[in-house]
């Protein structure tokens, strides 16, 4: 029995060290060399302090900011530990009520906007963490943000155009706007005014 236990235990310790320590360190080291921003969480910093990630949305509820896509995570929005969709079908009364509430909130925040509300402003993504909105969703909010911030609509529209990303590699996905980056640029623009 002893001759079986020693090799099994030695193999267990060796494989634990290789797969639990060596392999993760090697993969992390390679990723930090090849993809330093991605390996560090794609963090966005302001004045040396992290304010968010390019990959995870944030809850902007103040009307002076562009609002992102609703989060499906609960109890707190954009919780990376609870990433998932709502799994509610299109006829589910809970989803219908949630969408009605989101439409009402958008209309209450901008009484003057009679345009049709883009779908991505009232429905959550599959992960519930989407940091992007469509250019149409950003354009829908431009007048509200410009009016509240005291900016010209052209200045706000120029920011939206500047922060609109095209398709990945020109092929995949749709054009999109990262809400956190757009709102940070908006704050910089307002702070630069005399």
Image: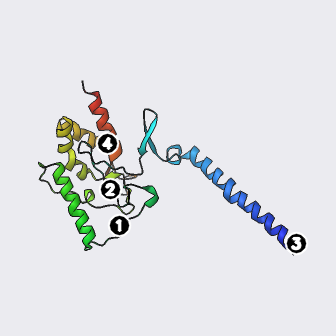
Q: Residue at 18%, 44% (x, y): give it.
A: 144
Q: Tell me, yes or no, whether the two marked residues, 2 and 1, touch with CB atoms within 8 Å.
A: no
Going from N to C along the chain, the mark reached first, 3 or 2, is 3
Placement of 156 over or under 2, stated as above or below: above
Dot 1 corresponds to which residue?
86
Task: Give the number of the mark in front: 2 or 1.
Answer: 1
Q: What element carries label 3?
A: helix
Going from N to C along the chain, the mark reached first, 1 or 4, is 1
| Distance between mark 3 and mark 1 Cα atoms | 54 Å
**Please, which residue is most extreme toward the bottom here?**
1
| Distance between mark 2 and mark 1 Cα atoms | 22 Å
Q: Specify the quadrant of the image occupied by residue 154.
A: top left
Going from N to C along the chain, the mark reached first, 4 or 2, is 2
Dot 2 corresponds to which residue?
174
Q: Where is residue 141 in the image (x, y as percent from the top left)?
A: 21, 47
Dot 4 corresponds to which residue?
182
Q: Residue at 26%, 45% (x, y): give it.
A: 62
Q: Where is residue 126 in the image (x, y as percent from the top left)?
A: 37, 63
Dot 3 corresponds to which residue?
2
């Amino acid at each position: 029995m002893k001759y079986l236990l020693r090799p099994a235990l030695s193999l267990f310790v060796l494989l634990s060290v290789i797969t639990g320590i060596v392999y993760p360190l090697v993969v992390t080291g390679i990723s930090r060399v090849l993809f330093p921003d991605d390996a560090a969480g794609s963090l966005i910093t302001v004045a040396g302090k992290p304010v968010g990630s390019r990959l995870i949305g944030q809850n902007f509820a103040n009307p002076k900011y562009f609002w992102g896509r609703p989060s499906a995570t609960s109890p707190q929005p954009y919780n990376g530990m609870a990433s998932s969709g709502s799994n509610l079908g299109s006829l589910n009364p809970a989803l219908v009520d949630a969408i009605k509430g989101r439409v009402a909130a958008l209309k209450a925040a901008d009484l003057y906007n009679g345009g049709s509300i883009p779908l991505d402003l009232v429905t959550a993504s599959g992960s519930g963490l989407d940091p992007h909105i469509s250019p149409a969703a950003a354009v829908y909010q431009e007048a509200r943000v410009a009016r509240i911030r005291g900016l010209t609509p052209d200045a706000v529209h120029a920011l939206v155009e500047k922060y609109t990303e095209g398709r990945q590699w020109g092929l995949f996905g749709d054009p999109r706007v990262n809400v956190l980056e757009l709102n940070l640029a908006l704050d910089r623009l307002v702070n630069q005014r005399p």
